[in-house]
Image: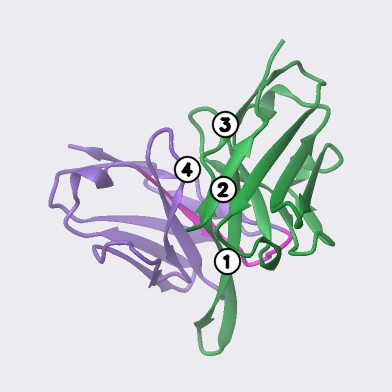
Chain colours: A purple, B green
């Protein structure tokens, strides 16, 4: 089974800053990762699929990259509504399995 | 617009059963794999089960195998999760989600899968 290690578990930043969240996979994931944003008490929302493709309606300050087993989500110029929790997700063994990272909480400094 | 609405969450005693429902609208339900994902209080997301477009294939997280059954009624645009032998660790919010796929180029064309639409969730509490 693929193991996903998401880091950091939390990060503090200010409005206007840039933050990068990382997911490291235990093996290569040819189809890439998806990234989700979750606000408190709400359902997750898709941000990025295929490691770098922006889902419709998602602001361009969100971007994703992939390098081997290392995946990143970068939020440039943080806005007040971005201080929530983010998850990565892989589906290399779909449909028998989906795996989420442990989550990263972006907090206001 | 895609709309998913879960229902059926409740307080249930350990060992009890519960059936969750998810009403879908705004898309061709029978053309999509569907998933259940749960979230324990204060914890992260955990995939629970997948079901094929026509309901012929189902897959579960190990902790749900033998206890949970995912099903669907394409005529009613509805997804279900029958949960038996419930345990305290099954407590959490259960989300239904639509599976979408896309082709990505990584030296070759590959299919990637992700959850592009989610319901608001329904709370299951397992406690005596």
Q: Residue at x 47, y 73 (%)?
A: A68
Can you identify the residue that label 4 sits on?
A43
Please tell me in which quadrant of the rendered image residue A60 appears: bottom left
Q: Nearer the viewer, mark 3 or mark 4?
A: 4
Q: Position of residue A93 (x, y in %)?
A: 68, 65
Q: Is residue B67 magenta?
A: no
The residues tagged by marks 2 and 1 sit, at their Cα atoms, a distance apart of 14 Å
Circle 3: element type: loop
Disc on res. B80: none
Disc on res. B40: 3
Q: Chain of mark 3?
A: B
The residues tagged by marks 4 and 1 sit, at their Cα atoms, a distance apart of 17 Å
Category of crowding for the residue at label 1, using alpha-carbon neighbours closer than 10 angstroms: few (below 14), some (14–19), many (at least 20): some
Can you identify the residue that label 1 sits on?
B100
Q: Chain of mark 1?
A: B
Circle 1: element type: strand
Q: Chain of mark 2?
A: B
Disc on res. B4: 2
């Amino acid at each position: 089974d693929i193991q996903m290690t998401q880091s950091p578990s939390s990060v503090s930043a200010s409005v206007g800053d840039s933050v990068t969240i990382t997911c490291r996979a235990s093996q290569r994931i040819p189809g890439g990762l998806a990234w989700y944003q979750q606000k408190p008490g709400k359902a997750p929302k898709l941000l990025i699929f295929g490691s770098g493709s922006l889902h419709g309606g998602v602001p361009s300050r969100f971007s994703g990259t992939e390098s081997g087993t290392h995946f990143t989500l970068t939020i440039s110029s943080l806005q007040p509504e971005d201080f929530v929790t983010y998850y990565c997700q892989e589906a290399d063994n779909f449909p028998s399995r989906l795996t989420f990272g442990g989550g990263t909480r972006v907090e206001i400094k | 617009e895609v709309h998913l609405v879960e229902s059926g969450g409740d307080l249930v005693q350990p060992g009890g059963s519960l059936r969750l429902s998810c009403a879908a609208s705004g898309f061709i339900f029978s053309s999509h794999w569907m998933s259940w994902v749960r979230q324990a209080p204060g914890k992260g997301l955990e995939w629970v089960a997948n079901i094929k477009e026509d309901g012929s294939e189902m897959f579960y997280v190990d902790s749900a195998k033998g206890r949970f059954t995912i099903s669907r009624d394409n005529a009613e645009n509805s997804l279900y999760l029958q949960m038996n032998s419930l345990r305290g660790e099954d407590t959490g919010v259960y989300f239904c989600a639509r599976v979408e796929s896309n082709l990505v180029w990584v030296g070759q064309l590959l299919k990637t899968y992700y959850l592009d639409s989610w319901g608001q969730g329904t709370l299951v509490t397992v406690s005596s």
